[in-house]
Amino acid sequence: MKTLRDIETGISTKVIKLHGEGPTKRRIMDMGITKGCELFVRKVAPLGDPIEVTVRGYELTLRKADAQMIEVE
């Protein structure tokens, strides 16, 4: 299983599945990250937290723990 946390800077990828339950999964979905959407990793902080991504034209910042729950191609 490959997660968003494993993707390098400057790479586009597609979301396969969201893991997790309850408010955490709801928060990710409220950002517009759903199954099938395209993500572009813009920047990763030196220690890996946070991860900046572009989703549907919006620039978002994700925590490392949230990125671990997003399975990608």
Image: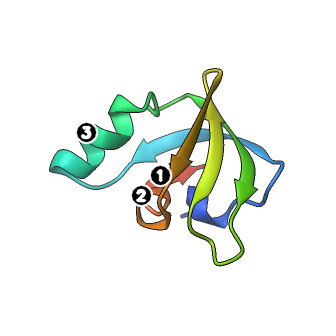
State the residue position of label 3.
Answer: 26
Identify the secondary structure beneath mark 1: strand
Picture residue at 65% right of the left edge, 21% below the top:
57
Q: Nearer the viewer, residue 50 or 25?
A: 50
Check if mark 1's residue and mark 2's residue have beta carbons within 8 Å.
Answer: yes
Crowdedness near tag 1: few (<14), some (14–19) or many (≥20) residues, C-alpha within 10 Å:
many
Return the residue found at the far bottom. 47
Check if mark 2's residue and mark 3's residue have beta carbons within 8 Å.
Answer: no
Identify the secondary structure beneath mark 2: helix
* Residue 48 placement: quadrant: bottom right
Q: Amino acid at mark 2?
A: Asp
Picture residue at 47% right of the left edge, 60% below the top:
63
User: In the shown orientation, is residue 70 left or right of residue 47?
Assistant: left
Check if mark 3's residue and mark 1's residue have beta carbons within 8 Å.
Answer: no
Query: Can residue 2 be seen at all in this image of the molecule?
Result: no
Q: Amino acid at mark 1?
A: Ile
Q: Amino acid at mark 3?
A: Arg
State the residue position of label 2.
Answer: 66
Which one is in front in this view, the residue at disc 1 or the one at disc 2?
2
Crowdedness near tag 2: few (<14), some (14–19) or many (≥20) residues, C-alpha within 10 Å:
many
User: In the shown orientation, is residue 45 left or right of residue 36?
Assistant: right
Per the model, the C-alpha gap separating discs 3 and 1 is: 12 Å
Picture residue at 72% right of the left edge, 74% below the top:
46
Return the residue found at the far left. 22
Q: Residue 39 at x, y = what percent? A: 65, 37
User: In the shown orientation, is residue 64 left or right of residue 22?
Assistant: right
Quarter of the figure that contains the N terminus: bottom right
Vertical position of residue 67 compared to residue 16: above or below: below
Indicate which disc, 2 or 3, sits on the residue closer to the N terminus.
Answer: 3
